[in-house]
């Protein structure tokens, strides 16, 4: 019933934007799909025989750090060769436009690929961390790391179309240069809390947000899945950009259905 109330009118959306004072954009894997980066759910969500979300857990890393590092090495390889698409650029342009118009603007992303920054967005809140940083399991030190491969033993590993596991001994996996502890990607896995600073910046962003754009996320993973209902309950407007419907679609006043590389530039034009 409610979906009929959703609008895809660019004129109506422009008028809501004109009056908005605090604009927040929340993105998910779908915005990077057209840059060639596989999403988690649906088509492309499998790596070997694993559902990508099975590997994104502390338990998977504890049980088989070599396998999980192969998975992240594969993703680092893909992302290293990827470029932002028109959707990322439209979001970056929106930030500049908001700045010119004196509106608050905050970009929250669930993606760890860094493509928003590459497209020119600044102060991006990376809810789930970054592919390009590591954290030491022992001393907890966080370091930027863009080495490809991140350690010699991962060279040529991580192919998605094999069942052969590399079984790299722990001492040959990425190690901390301070304490030699095992490194892990600095990302947020299921069951882990988002970082305190990230939660604070997110709370600040959502407080008084009167226009939320939700782009390319299946909206099933919390806490991000709760942001659209929250903004709506505060009286704000939610606009969804997705090729499909999602559980938050019914919270949305606007639905721009289709690839975000086309729909974002059109709506934000
Ligand atoms: C296009 C497109 C195109 C395609 N154009 N669109 C409350 C209720 C129930 C459970 C929980 C709850 N609170 C917490 C939980 C537990 C859990 C959770 O949410 N579970 C649910 C699955 C039920 N959450 C957590 O554990 C979080 N931690 C937390 O809340 O701590 C406190 C706590 C802990 C435990 C219990 C209670 C509280 C942490 C979540 C961490 C998620 N981590 C991952 C991996 C990150 C690292 C990595 O990338 O490897 O994050 S999992 C994975 O899912 C990744 C993504 O960021 C995230 C969301 O996926 P996303 O971006 O939505 O991608 P897809 O693939 O799902 O969707 C793509 C969409 O794009 C689709 O809709 C397509 O249609 C669309 N699309 N092409 C536009 N061209
Ligand atoms: Zn260390």
Image: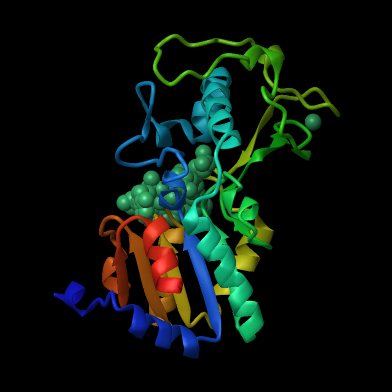
Residue 200 drawn at (x, y percent): 64, 66
Residue 154 shown left or right of residue 6 in the figure: right
- Residue 134 position, x and y percent, is 70, 36
Place of residue 60 in the rendered image (x, y in percent of width and height, measured from the top left): 49, 27
Above or below for 171 versus 26: above
Q: Residue at 48% across / 83% down in the picture?
A: 210
On the picture, is 262 further left or further right than 246?
Answer: right
Q: Is residue 146 visible?
A: yes
Q: Quadrant of ligand 2?
A: top right
Asked where in the image residue 108 lies, by quadrant, the reply is: bottom right
Give the residue displayed 58% in from the left and 14% down from the top.
156
Query: Which residue appears at 30% of the width and 41% of the height?
Result: 42
Using residue 226 as the reference point, say whether residue 167 is left or right of it.
right
| Residue 229 in view (yes/no) | no
124 shown above or below 178: below
Tell me where residue 171 appears, x and y as whole percent.
71, 13
Give the tally of numbered discs: 0
């Amino acid at each position: 019933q409610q979906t009929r109330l959703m609008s895809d009118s660019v004129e109506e959306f422009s008028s809501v934007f004109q009056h908005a004072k605090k604009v927040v954009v929340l993105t998910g894997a779908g915005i990077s799909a057209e840059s060639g980066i596989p999403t988690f759910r649906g088509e492309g969500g499998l790596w070997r025989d694993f559902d990508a979300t099975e590997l994104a857990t502390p338990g998977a890393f504890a049980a088989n750090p070599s396998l999980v590092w192969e998975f992240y090495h594969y993703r680092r390889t893909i992302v290293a060769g990827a470029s932002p698409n028109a959707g990322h650029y439209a979001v970056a342009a929106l930030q500049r436009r908001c700045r010119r118009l004196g509106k608050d603007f905050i970009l929250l992303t669930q993606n760890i690929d860094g493509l928003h920054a590459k497209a020119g967005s600044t102060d991006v809140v990376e809810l789930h961390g970054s592919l390009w940083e590591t954290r030491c399991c022992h001393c907890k030190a966080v370091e930027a790391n863009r080495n490809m491969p991140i350690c010699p033993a991962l060279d040529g590993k991580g192919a998605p179309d094999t069942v052969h596991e590399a079984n790299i001994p722990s001492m040959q996996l990425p190690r901390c240069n301070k304490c030699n502890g095992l490194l892990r990607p600095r990302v947020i896995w299921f069951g882990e809390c988002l970082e305190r600073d990230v939660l604070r910046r997110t709370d600040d962003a959502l407080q008084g947000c009167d226009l939320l754009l939700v782009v390319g996320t299946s909206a099933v993973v919390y806490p991000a899945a709760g942001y659209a209902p929250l903004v709506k309950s505060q009286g704000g407007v939610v606009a969804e950009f997705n090729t499909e419907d999602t559980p938050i679609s019914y919270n949305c006043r606007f639905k721009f259905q289709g690839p975000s590389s086309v729909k974002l530039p059109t709506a934000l034009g």
